[in-house]
């Protein structure tokens, strides 16, 4: 099992291919497995790196979870793997993490894709985090995970339901609540305004967790960013509509 010890954590990662580095940042409650199809698709052209964020998958959570310390972990991983500027693809909670990564280590990010994410959810984000804490205090991760999957994935493709449920249900409730609190209360508006690398913002047209207007806000904040909608996709567009996701992302990643 590939592990790297950095920042007092043991981080699991998947790495495949060769070429320019391509870092993939997963969503809350998932892990590197979320990018399985993308790793296969992109590894002929890139050195693809997908890391389980601390507290997720097979990575430790000794120092606690904040979006900024996860960004610091990823900066340390990129540095350990050669320090070459990377293309970065981030989904959902990966958006705020990527914003902090650019802030912490701008020389390590060459190009950025932000999928199904947000800059600031304000009071709605705080309420959402509090609701998750309350729900998990009264019930199980398994019950929560099944409700989450039903409300997150498209109805016409059950392929990924059990994998998503298992991923969330396998997390410690305290780890999930801590991560949700940091993610949903994150405000990276000013960090996005400071981004100076080519950026594409993509979102599923049916994303009901971070709806298109939130991605439109990101695109408006980042100088020069463009915006693409993925028809029919919900919150995890790379799982829901992989063909549409790749049509939106691949040409941008390969552009020089």
Image (cartoon, rainbow, N blue to C red):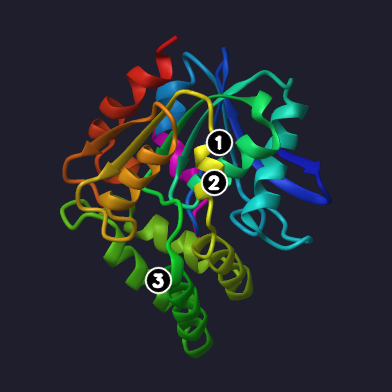
Which residue range is magenta in the image? 29-37
In contact (CB < 8 Å): disc 2 and disc 1: yes
Q: Earlier in the sequence, mark 3 or mark 2?
A: 3
Label 2 environment density (alpha carbons within 10 Å; few <14, some 14–19, many ≥20): few
The extreme right residue here reads 8
Q: Which residue is mark 3?
A: 124
Q: Quadrant of residue 115?
A: top left
Residue 220 located within the stretch drawn in magenta: no
Q: Which residue is mark 2?
A: 190
> Which residue shows up at 61% across the image and 35% down it?
102
**Direction from residue 78 to residue 182 in the image, left or right:** left
> Which residue shows up at 55% across the image and 36% down it?
194
Position of the C terminus, as image quadrant, is top left
**Direction from residue 177 to residue 162 in the image, left or right:** left
Q: Earlier in the sequence, mark 3 or mark 1?
A: 3
Position of the N terminus, as image quadrant, is top right
Query: Height in image: 150 above or below 39?
Result: below
> Which residue shows up at 66% across the image and 26% down it?
108
Query: Height in image: 205 above or below 256?
Result: below
Q: Which residue is mark 1?
A: 194
* Image x and y of residue 11, in percent: 71, 46
């Amino acid at each position: 099992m590939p592990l790297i010890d950095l920042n007092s954590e043991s981080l699991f990662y998947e790495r495949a291919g060769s070429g320019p580095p391509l870092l993939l940042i997963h969503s809350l409650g998932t892990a590197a497995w979320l990018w399985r199809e993308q790793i296969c698709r992109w590894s002929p052209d890139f050195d693809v790196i997908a890391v389980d964020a601390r507290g997720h998958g097979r990575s430790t959570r000794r120092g606690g979870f904040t979006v900024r310390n996860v960004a610091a972990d990823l900066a340390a991983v990129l540095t350990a793997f050669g320090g070459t500027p990377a293309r970065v693809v981030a989904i959902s909670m990966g958006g705020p993490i990527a914003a902090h990564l650019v802030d912490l280590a701008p020389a390590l990010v060459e190009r950025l894709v932000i999928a199904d994410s947000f800059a600031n959810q304000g009071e709605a984000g705080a309420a959402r985090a509090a609701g998750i804490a309350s729900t998990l205090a009264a019930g199980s991760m398994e019950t929560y995970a099944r409700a989450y999957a039903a409300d997150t994935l498209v109805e016409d493709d059950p392929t990924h339901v059990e994998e998503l449920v298992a991923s969330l249900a396998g997390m410690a409730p305290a780890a999930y609540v801590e991560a949700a609190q940091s993610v949903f209360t994150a405000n990276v508006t000013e960090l996005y305004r400071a981004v100076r690398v080519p950026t594409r913002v993509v979102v599923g047209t049916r994303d009901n967790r971070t709806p298109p207007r939130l991605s439109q806000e990101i695109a408006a904040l980042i100088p020069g960013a463009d915006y693409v909608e993925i028809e029919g996709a919900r919150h995890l567009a790379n799982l829901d509509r992989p063909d549409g996701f790749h049509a939106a992302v691949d040409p941008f990643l390969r552009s020089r």
